[in-house]
Amino acid sequence: MTGGLPNEVEVVECVEYGHINVDPLIWVSDNHRAVFSSEIDGRRVLQATVHEGQLRLQATSYVGVIPLNDQVIVRVRPRFPIANLTRMVTDTGHQHIEALTAFRDYSTQGTADDWTMDLYADALLDYVDDLLDKGLHRVYVHREDEGHFPHGRIDVNRTVQRFAARGIPNKAAYSWFERTVDTPANRCVKAAMEVVYGHLTKKRPQQRKGGAKRLARLVGQMAALEEVNNDPDWRFMDDPQVLGLDPLPDPRAYYRAALDLSVAILRGAGITLDVSGRDVQLASQLIDTNKLFERFVRVSLEKYGKRHGWPVKVLDGNTDGSVTFYDVPNPLPAPFGEPLEALASRDPGRAQPDVVFRAADGTFPLVAEVKNKRSSDDALPDRDDVEQAVTYALRYGLTTALLIHPWSRGRAGLVYVGRVRNVDVYDYRLDLSLHDDLDEALADMGRTVARLAGLS
């Protein structure tokens, strides 16, 4: 079992939105209440369902390592082939991602950005607290000195040569072994703490919440390591125990995770969310794939539009791209002779497509609904999604309704679904499984959307 989990904890693998094979007796109490970890209790991370007459637990749109309770850890993976999860999270500004206390192993890749350094800072603070609590790594080093008050072992030969032969009877050469915390392992951790200190104290457009508390905590830890010398040349990076080439002493095996993280910090290495590994151990990053996919599509179209000079803005319909849903006609309809008051005069509602293209003159050449759902050549999109997309198209005065899904199987790219009265419905399937060709897939989406919107 990996990820620093206790041996008695069961690890259950599951796919996003899949049913989890866990006996209800483990997560339902005697009074029929769900027994979940406090981190996920009350959050829509996992939910109870009835499947074929049996009470089951089902994953939702969150992927990552989820502590169900003290007995079960659930690992939820994306249901679609995603080879660029790290890229998606980075491009969207690391939104819709949060850390849990459950640990998992990650591979290092690329260069650490501010978000990664924030993760590293939190993890290193916890690791150093653990080191100070369990005891710092110490070794015995050989020391030599000369003087009137010897201790340890007298070096007879050196004493005779240096003092007795010169008629100095009250001085001696001596040596002893001294226990010290000034070890390569501690110098490595301290150097990483100094890098984190620089990260926490640098100026940012928006300071991270809780930064002052983290900084005060780090300063206190550094004071506890004041006996550890600074090594500006980082010679400790050649130490086989620091690099994990030689095992640490069994009583100090808990240093391994802190050293792996310190090495990653000093090398400036980022982490990848796409594949597992054993380079560093960090808190599990829980990702809402629904919100991530929606934002990734919108951000990618916005970047493509800016590069190609689109004469429109790509907006979020949930915020600045929305319009009122209902109109209030004048005069009001009067089917029974007297005009009926419109409820919409008090609350017109909002039409909020996921992606809105707005031109400088205020017109909307295209809107799109982004759905993190399965799509394939031989199946129609979900009826509810089509109805929503068509309704939004009508509200924005369009004859084209566009859905965007992640590709799962069949044909990727643009698919024509059909026509609802005078509205043509299209479905674009974005292939996220490509390692090296994701930029081309995004470019194809940009070209296709530009054609549907009538943009040059």
Image: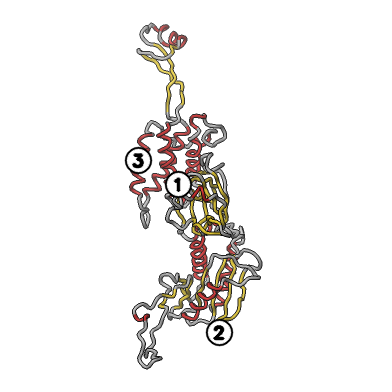
Q: Secondary structure at mark 2?
A: loop
Q: Secondary structure at mark 3?
A: helix
Residue 101 is tagged as: 1
The quarter of the image holding the N terminus is: top right
Q: Nearer the viewer, mark 3 or mark 2?
A: 2
State the separation of the CA atoms marked 1 and 2: 52 Å
Q: Mark 1 or mark 2: which comes first in sequence?
A: 1
Which is more toward the observer, 405 or 374? 374
Residue 219 is tagged as: 3
Residue 242 higher or lower than 329, as above or below: above
The disc labelled 2 sits on which kind of residue? Answer: Asn
| Disc 2 crowd, CA 10 A, few/some/many (<14, 14-19, 20+) | few
Q: Mark 1 or mark 3: which comes first in sequence?
A: 1
The spot of residue 359 in percent (x, y) is: 46, 78
Residue 146 higher or lower than 80, as above or below: above
The disc labelled 3 sits on which kind of residue? Answer: Val
The disc labelled 1 sits on which kind of residue? Answer: Thr
| Disc 3 crowd, CA 10 A, few/some/many (<14, 14-19, 20+) | some
Q: Mark 3 or mark 2: which comes first in sequence?
A: 3
The spot of residue 244 in percent (x, y) is: 55, 36
Residue 53 is tagged as: none
Q: CB atoms at circles 1 and 3 under 8 Å apart?
A: no
- Residue drawn at point x = 42 percent, y = 49 percent: 38
| Disc 1 crowd, CA 10 A, few/some/many (<14, 14-19, 20+) | few
The quarter of the image holding the C terminus is: bottom right
Q: Which residue is mark 2?
A: 422
Q: CB atoms at circles 1 and 2 under 8 Å apart?
A: no
Residue 229 higher or lower than 73, as above or below: above
